[in-house]
Image (tube, rainbow, N blue to C red):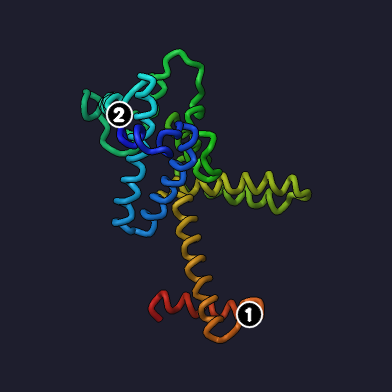
């Protein structure tokens, strides 16, 4: 990275702001590789993310703000501080207790700053992930349903309110409430809703491409087929995927 910043015209021009969007892109590429269970790609994408960490650190070092060593030392200190059940005398016998301790330590670290429990949730997260993280943080201070069954009652309640809504504005608001409740139910059921939705996205993409291929084999375009014909192909693909 020292060489690149000194010799490469493109690398010389970059700032933290200019590579921020690229970092986001690399994160999504890593996510895709993990979902596909492609460990070769996971390795490559981790390398790309590591490059970005080194890049940001190099830029900061040029103004003597921090360097990559400072980043690593800061991380080590945080991990020790937030794992008192390993490096201290706190007891935590399950993952939920560890998460609860983590959130409490984060609050203590903020000291007298007037930050709320949810202030640490990044504003740029997608809606489903943001809902999940807010619910997760709220649960660490006891603001949560006792179990998934109780949360599902809220899902049913919100769906009923959506059905009863009349204006588009009301329906939009109630549908948001329904999705939020559904995310809560998924979380308490041990399912990450964003992971589940992305798996379904990938499945839909795979099956729709298969429909296109089968239609092409019949010398037809999808625009020439009706819904019943396409649905029949969809069902055939589902059976083939299940080994029938």
Q: Residue at (49%, 38%) from the top-left corner?
A: 135
The image shows residue 97, relative to residue 106, as above or below, that is: below
Q: Position of residue 40 (x, y in %)?
A: 29, 56
Between 184 and 222, the residue placed more toward the observer is 222
- Provide the secondary structure element on which disc 2 rests: helix
The crowd level at tag 1 (other Cα within 10 Å; few <14, some 14-19, many 20+) is few
Between 215 and 197, the residue placed more toward the observer is 215
Q: Residue at (68%, 44%) from the top-left corner?
A: 173
The image shows residue 160, relative to residue 20, as above or below, that is: below
The part of the image, by quadrant, that contains residue 13 is: top left
Q: Position of residue 235 (x, y in %)?
A: 52, 77
| Residue behind mark 2 | 68
| Residue behind mark 1 | 228
Between 90 and 214, the residue placed more toward the observer is 214
**Quarter of the image with the C terminus in it:** bottom left
Residue pushed farthest bottom?
218
Mark closer to the observer (2, 1): 2
Q: Earlier in the sequence, mark 2 or mark 1?
A: 2
Q: Position of residue 217 (x, y in %)?
A: 52, 84
Would you say 168 lies left or right of 175 here? right
Q: Position of residue 4 (x, y in %)?
A: 34, 37
Q: Residue at (34%, 22%) from the top-left corner?
A: 66
């Amino acid at each position: 990275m020292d060489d690149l910043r000194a010799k490469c015209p493109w690398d010389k021009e970059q700032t933290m702001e200019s590579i921020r969007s690229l970092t986001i892109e690399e994160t999504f590429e890593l996510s895709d590789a993990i979902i596909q269970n492609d460990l070769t790609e996971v390795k490559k994408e981790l390398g790309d993310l590591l490059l970005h960490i080194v890049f940001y650190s190099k830029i900061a070092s040029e103004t003597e703000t921090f360097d990559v060593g400072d980043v690593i030392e800061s991380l080590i200190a945080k991990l020790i501080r937030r794992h008192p059940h390993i490096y201290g005398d706190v007891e935590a016998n399950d993952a939920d207790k560890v998460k609860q301790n983590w959130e409490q330590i984060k609050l203590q670290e903020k000291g007298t700053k007037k930050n709320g429990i949810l202030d640490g949730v990044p504003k740029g997260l997608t809606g489903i992930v943001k809902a999940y993280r807010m619910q997760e943080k709220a649960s660490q201070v006891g603001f949560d349903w006792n179990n998934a069954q109780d949360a599902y009652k809220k899902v049913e309640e919100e769906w009923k309110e959506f059905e009863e809504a009349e204006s588009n504005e009301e329906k939009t608001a109630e549908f948001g409430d329904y999705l939020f409740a559904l995310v809560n139910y998924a979380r308490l059921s041990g399912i990450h809703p964003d992971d589940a939705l992305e798996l379904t996205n990938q499945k839909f993409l795979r099956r729709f491409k298969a429909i296109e291929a089968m239609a092409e084999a019949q010398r037809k375009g999808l625009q020439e087929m009706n819904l019943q014909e396409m649905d029949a192909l969809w069902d055939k693909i589902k059976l083939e995927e299940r080994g029938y």
